[in-house]
Image (cartoon, coloured by chain):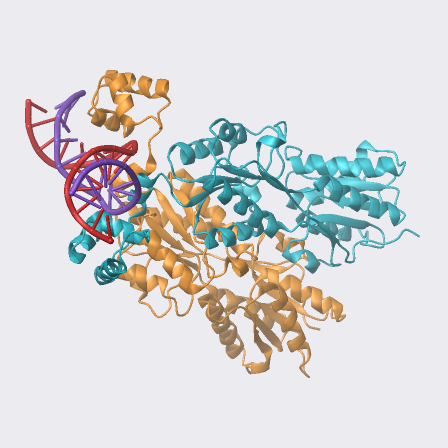
Chain colours: A cyan, B orange, C red, D purple
Amino acid sequence: MAVTIKDVARRANVAPSTVSRVISNSSRISEKTKERVREAMKELGYHPNLNARSLANKSTKTIGVIMPNSAKVAFQNPFFPEVIRGITTKAYQEGYGLYLSTGQTEDEILEEVKQMVYGGRVDGILLLYSRVNDKVMPFLLEHGFPFVLIGRPYNIDESKVTFVNNDNYKAAKTVTDYLVLLGHKRIGFIGGNLDYVVTVDHMKGYEQALQNANIELREDYIVHHAEVKEGGQDAVIELMSIDQRPTALVVADDIMTFGVIRMLEDMEVHVPDDMSIVSFNNVMISELSSPPMTTVDIHIYDLGLQATHCLINKINDPDIEEKKVIIPHRLIKRQTCKKME
Amino acid sequence: MAVTIKDVARRANVAPSTVSRVISNSSRISEKTKERVREAMKELGYHPNLNARSLANKSTKTIGVIMPNSAKVAFQNPFFPEVIRGITTKAYQEGYGLYLSTGQTEDEILEEVKQMVYGGRVDGILLLYSRVNDKVMPFLLEHGFPFVLIGRPYNIDESKVTFVNNDNYKAAKTVTDYLVLLGHKRIGFIGGNLDYVVTVDHMKGYEQALQNANIELREDYIVHHAEVKEGGQDAVIELMSIDQRPTALVVADDIMTFGVIRMLEDMEVHVPDDMSIVSFNNVMISELSSPPMTTVDIHIYDLGLQATHCLINKINDPDIEEKKVIIPHRLIKRQTCKKME
DNA sequence: TTGAAAGCGCTAACAC
DNA sequence: GTGTTAGCGCTTTCAA
């Protein structure tokens, strides 16, 4: 059996409560006793039992991280590693640990969240996605459990939830405007899963830009795919089979763009000469495509960092008011766009 | 305050222990009482407190996942997401949760591991890397704490630790043999961080293949870089500045290969016409490079899955004997290799 | 400034 | 089959 607070107390000739106070560095303990107790802890190799502490405390110092259903797909995309990197950094600084969701389906995940909340496993929850008809958020809201959303609440009053997001609408609009400015009129859109709010926002931005430019919206220029890998490739096939092919593409995600470029290459459609492309995220390898891709940097790392920051604030002060943080984005011009002749 | 086991007991007119037994579905409870108790749980909306359970139980049903120091670098590489995907799958099946390390330096991580172990936060630990002078493994070994290593123990008796690995030596040898068979004699090697055992193994395989082929080893053909992104590019510069440039490259990692191809392209060295390349891992995007890369599939997902499987076995039966699992690899031929004229 | 003791919610040994 | 009860190791009143 491991050494407990009682052992330390005995050794230092004090009461267990005193040891506890020393651990939390209470100001009402004399320096002398503190020293003596610390000594004893060292000698015995004492380490607190975190479960016992959590039980007495009702605080776990851990954050639950909920990934979209099926990490299967999620983790394919460097977005998640990168956002977790941001989360990790802040969490470590503040002495929090991370507890990861493992469920694959929406229902499994909801079950897990319930366990985390009811079971007292975590002090707060980070939602790494915003889905259109999500059940997790309503649950959390209903129970007044601290959480922060990365993304944007949908069908839920924004003032009721703290979230960290990009202005994806604007980003998509800017990017489309940019292609229009380069002289493109036939601009296709390859979007992600329509269940995700980010996809909805992207599409609206794209549509608005075209409308502003008096370019007619063509249904057949818009393709959606859930899978980042095959998705990009399938989408290309669809778009290239159209009579009047697009000359430029707005692509939901950099990884998709890899697939898109690859596929176009196979069809001898050259980027950027025959096709311009802009996409989103600017993950690490985005600059390593051939040609290097023009993309919107959404500062994924910051999304994670800020969200964690907000969450910890909320945990520390449950009555803090809800907050909306927009992380700025930035168009990174590389070599997948070209002016129309 | 949440509803506890006592509330349920009162409601169902039984003792708390009975409720506990119903929860664990003990066979010594009559179906009738079980029903009654379950009814009460439903009515009251009971959910067990996991901290209390862990405290009484000395079991947390969670696995600690330790990433190499600085997830900063680690997560850049799709290897980790993919291995976690494997872990996640098995863990979920078996009802285990995942607790992630967040430390950046080796010391921080060792501290975290100690916390996990002493603090009773996890039942077992998964080590996602094998470093040459690692302190975590000795610690775990010394404390007889259940853990499984993904990779290979170094400077530690293999029979003392359960590990899941590829035969990286052989993979590197095969790959180099392959290039030799294609007629290459000037074969460069771009390796990862030499602190990692996998890098050591790769290099040995490479050297052995050259030796077997009676090709002299050239120091200047061997370059190591820790960072996957810049690494590949820097390495190319070094290798291309040599008088007698290599005609083929063995690259430690697919992501590096993206950088390598990119850089070669900039120098108008075309792959595979002017340079053949083979690398390792076969992550999702590996087939999306231009040209698609020839690489060794190491079945990352299986590494994670098997390791988790072994760990859970060890947790359930601490006296089970240590085991060594080698996940097979497979050369995936795509388009970055060409026969020398 | 310190100690005694109650309790956090659950499990498991022991009794019946 | 079911109940009683003593912990698990810590925190936190309340007293002194």
Residue A241 percent across, percent down from the top left = 81, 39
**Residue A29 shown left or right of residue B163 in the figure:** left
Q: Nearer the viewer, residue A24 or D7?
A: A24
Residue A78 visible in the current orientation: no
Q: Nearer the viewer, residue B3 or B101?
A: B3
**Residue B217 shown left or right of residue B182 in the figure:** left
**Residue A52 shown left or right of residue B177 in the figure:** left
Residue that appears at 80% across and 42% down: A240
The quarter of the picture where residue A159 lies is top right
Residue B329 visible in the current orientation: yes
Residue B115 percent across, percent down from the top left = 34, 54
Residue that appears at 68% across and 46% down: A253
Residue B41 percent across, percent down from the top left = 33, 21
Residue that appears at 24% across and 61% down: A32
Residue A138 percent across, percent down from the top left = 53, 27
Image height of A94 relative to B218, above or below: above
Looking at the rendering, in which quadrant would you find the N terminus of chain B? top left
Image height of A103 relative to B283, above or below: above
Badge count: 0
Q: Nearer the viewer, residue A107 or B54?
A: B54
The quarter of the picture where residue B42 lies is top left
Looking at the rendering, in which quadrant would you find the C terminus of chain B? bottom right
